[in-house]
Amino acid sequence: MEFNKPIADMLPGMDVEGFYILRAAALKTTNNGKPFLSGTICDRTGSVEIKLWDYSGPIGARPDDTGRVVKIRGSVSEYRGALQISVHRIRMAEAADDYDTALLVPTAPIDADAALADVQRLVASIADADYRSVAETMLARHLDAFRRIPAGKTVHHSFLSGLLMHTSNMLRLADYLSGLYAGIIDRSLLLTGTLLHDFAKEREFTFSGLGMVTDYSLSGQLIGHLVMGTQEVQQCAESLGLPQEKSLLLQHMILSHHGEPDFGAAVRPMCAEAELLSYIDLIDSRMEIYAETLPGVPAGGFSQRIFALEKKIYHHN
């Protein structure tokens, strides 16, 4: 029996027992009508799918279980080229349990202080005073959450400081591409829209005590971060006395940054800066999916089908 084995070090045939974070959990039914738990656990080193057969709860029936620590006992196997744990026992962690959350909570592989300093440097370099005032005001308002929260629940950058890492990467791309396409891109608009595009995720999600996303909030489900972000930017712009067109352009950047309605955009990008922002967001989110997936795929092999990419990916030598 391996106790508190880091997920990255697990191998088929191991029996494991220990504390991990429950990243996702759902109660399902087999074809012959038997209940089972399907989910994912994680630690700082990676994540792995779990299955617990002939199980009907309570774990998996409560949305706020995700993002919290569980104790599991099970056997590691390989299924369709990926590790999976057949769980024999599972329970929520208790106050008397002895575990180190620092070894469990996934955290962005960056120097958060340096990344934040880089963001602040780029914000200070915004030439247009109106756009810069919105960027500085919004950054100051959201600074604590911006530095701390994940950028998503499961798809990409779903670890502590994930939003900071995602936005910092995007701002550096925006800075470079605004110079490459200087003839058609307003750098100030692009950098400001890039900074603001996901700020409302602070209100779109609910979070566990460890800072992990547990679920979508009520406003996140009914309205979403694009509309919530647009509403806040509109109010901020009005309070700072921005010209109407500048306010509308910033709102458009947020509403259209998912590119197409099929991907969640409220409107399609209709200016060069909005078009570029949608691609910058896509590049960084997709490259992060590759970065998180490839370590678990043997060289010369394919991953399982990735829902967000709608395909498998190949790990070349």
Image (cartoon, rainbow, N blue to C red):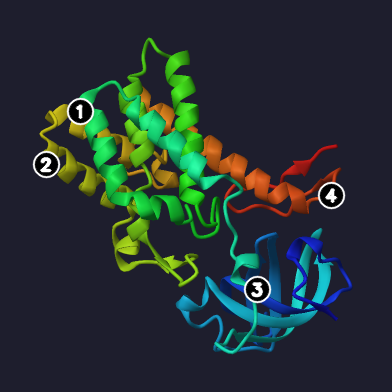
**Residue at coordinates 69% horizontally, 68% vertically from top-left?**
49
Residue type marked 4: Pro
Q: Is residue 62 above or below residue 43?
A: below
The residue that mark 1 highlights is 130
**Residue at coordinates 23% horizontally, 43% vertically from top-left?**
233
The disc label shown at residue 239, or none: 2
Local crowd size for mark 3, using a 10 Å CA cut-off: few (<14), some (14–19), many (≥20): many
The residue that mark 3 highlights is 20
Instruction: Report helix, strand or loop for mark 4.
Output: loop
Measure the C-alpha gap from mark 4 to mark 2. 54 Å
The disc label shown at residue 19, or none: none
Measure the C-alpha gap from mark 3 to mark 4. 24 Å
Measure the C-alpha gap from mark 2 to mark 1. 12 Å
* Image quarter of residue 317: top right
Looking at marks 3 and 1 on the same chain, the residue that comes earlier in the sequence is marked by 3
Measure the C-alpha gap from mark 3 to mark 1. 46 Å
Asked if the residue under mark 4 is in contact with the one under mark 3, i.e. CB atoms within 8 Å, the reply is: no
Looking at marks 2 and 3 on the same chain, the residue that comes earlier in the sequence is marked by 3
Looking at marks 1 and 4 on the same chain, the residue that comes earlier in the sequence is marked by 1
The disc label shown at residue 298, or none: 4
